[in-house]
Image (cartoon, grey):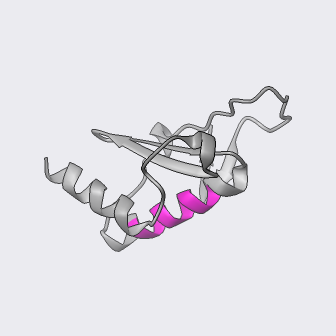
Amino acid sequence: MLFNVVLETLIRRSHVETQGMILDKCSKIMAYADDVVITGRKLQHVEEIFASLFKQTNKMGLEINEKNTEFMIVSQKHYNISEYVKLGTYNLK
């Protein structure tokens, strides 16, 4: 329960849109229990949300678990990216 309160605070302080659907937005963040999903129309949008969330987690003394953090592209286009994507100091698979 305490973690959920802290997570809610982190998301609110990151000033990321949490309401509505991604159809009419550039980015969105969703959370359930200890899982967080960041969606964006462009990698830049995801990077911005991740950076904002990262900044807020550091302020509260929390860390993002790089081993349990994954990156997925869902698109009709084919993207030629390496096995890992770098967001901030994190290499995400």
Tell me, yes or no, whether the highlighted magenta stretch contains residue 82.
no
Horizontal side, residue 47 vs residue 76: left or right? left
Q: Nearer the viewer, residue 17 or 35?
A: 17
When the figure is inspected, residue 34 is found, relative to residue 2, above or below; the finding is above
- How far from the left and from the top, in percent, is residue 55? 46, 69
- Judged from this view, the residue extending furthest toward the top is 76
Task: Point out the image quarter for the C terminus.
Answer: top right
- How far from the left and from the top, in percent, is residue 63? 38, 58
**Residue at the location (48% across, 60% down)?**
16
Identify the magenta region: 47-56
- How far from the left and from the top, in percent, is residue 48? 61, 62
Horizontal side, residue 17 vs residue 31: left or right? right
**Residue at the location (37% across, 43% down)?**
31
Most common secondary structure along the magenta stretch: helix
Horizontal side, residue 7 vs residue 5: left or right? right
Q: Where on the picture, by quarter, is residue 58?
A: bottom left
